[in-house]
Amino acid sequence: MADLFDTEPRSDASERPAPLADRLRPQSLGEVIGQEHVLGDDAPLGAMLAAGQLGSVIFWGPPGVGKTTIARLLADVTDLAFVQISAIFTGVPELRKIFEAAKLRRRNGGGTLLFVDEIHRFNKAQQDGFLPHMEDGTIVLVGATTENPSFELNSALLSRAQVITLKRLDLVALEKMLQRVEKAEGALPLDGEAREALTEMADGDGRALLNLAEQVLGWRLDAPIGRKALSERLMRRASQYDKSGDQHYNLISALHKSVRGSDPDAALYWLARMLKGGEDPRYLARRITRMAVEDIGLADPGAQRLCLDAWQTYERLGSPEGELALAQAVVYLALAPKSNAAYVGYKAAMRAAKEHGSDAPPKHILNAPTRLMKEEGYGAGYAYDHDAEDGFSGQDYFPDSMKRGVYYVPVERGQERELKKRVEYFAKLRAARRETGADTKN
């Protein structure tokens, strides 16, 4: 019997068969499932192929949706040599050899489709190394990435390659894949509910589905099993979540917009998705507090305090108990009255501060601790508001060189309704002071 370190080559008869995912790999673009939006006649790749002009492209999409397969088939259709590398394992010396081989192939009348998996892992200098070879036609670059190209690829590379988004496979596409499996390998021993559960376990990943199906076929069961038995034998594929990647920003955006849209159910779902994905609850506590400040604002000033209390509760209890406090805060924010008036006003004031960043305050509101400053007019004419009728002098506090701005415009919701009345009240008093000459500023 061969031991663990036996280096003698095995005969073909003893070789293990290729994985099911490899055996069922599509042999033509027409067999690719779930990406019709890029492969159809009027779709980006379909149009390129019809015109006989395949340019460099970047495939952006989740794992297991066909990036490598489509790249390989594009090379077949265009009669280009297919060269595949991974950015994880390839350095500058290997790239130089690949480019030299591509140049030689081109001089002999051939072309090269260079498929770069995980292209976002190349640094900026390495990405720049592709540019001259793309421009002179030495290679047609097909990059694959699961990360947002806008953030991970440099602008020079993006300007020379079209970004094509590949979709996560839906349940219909995954069911078509199961039908293809059964046509090649025989019926899966699953009842209807178990079959549906199998596609759900794959979570939009075609390769994961084929691997799961291969395990099921290997059980060689005599009778179909149900959902419960299947879940006992197979583990669900881990959900896609990268705490520093595109999914991180997509999901926090979904959570924030669900809160802003007053949908507590959706907000709880996205909060749970992030926690299940391993997100740091402290990050979520910080962002939830930000939501209270930005989107609830002065319509319910207590929302901010509630979020800070939830944050402190998490710090005291930790996970998983403390996560319930964050969930309660999310529900409260979703159902609270909404106002971004202070947020919008703050941004408008920041723009004005940038435009008038050197304008001095009016002298009448400046302190005059020295005789020279008094002689210069500092503090002259200042009216102490507490001595005025209604505690309001109506003086102007903007720079003399600047027209009065209006930044805070409260809404008729929640507690801000009362603030709106106060704003309108002081605006009328200010207008009255102007009419009497107490304040000449427009």
Image: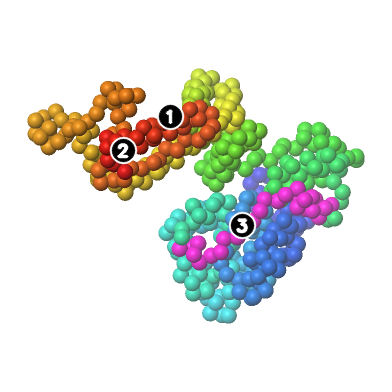
80 above or below 266?
A: below
Q: Earlier in the sequence, mark 1 or mark 2?
A: 1
The amino acid marked with disc number 3 is Thr
Quadrant position of residue 140: bottom right
Disc 3 secondary structure class: strand
Vertical arrangement, residue 183 with respect to residue 239, above or below: below
Query: What residue is drawn where x is 77% and y is 35%?
Result: 231
The x and y percentages for residue 403 are 31, 45
What residue span does the magenta drawing correspond to?
156-182
Q: Which residue is mark 3?
A: 165
Residue at far top of view? 316
**Which residue corresponds to the image point at 47% horizontal and 35% vertical from the top-left?**
410
Name the amino acid type tagged 1. Arg
Q: Quadrant of residue 52?
A: bottom right
Q: What residue do we see at 77% from left, 51% from top?
A: 172
User: In which quadrant will I find the N terminus?
Assistant: top right
Mark 1 secondary-structure assignment: helix
In the rendered structure, the answer to whether residue 101 lies left or right of residue 195 reads left
Q: Is residue 361 left or right of residue 329?
A: left
Q: Outermost residue toward the front?
A: 436
Depth-wise, is mark 2 or mark 3 nearer the camera? 2
> Is 230 contained in the magenta span?
no
Q: Give the residue number, with chain letter if any, for mark 1.
A: 422
Question: What percent of the width, then of the height, locates residue 48?
Answer: 63, 71
Residue that badge 2 annotates: 434
Disc 3 versus disc 1: nearer the observer: 1
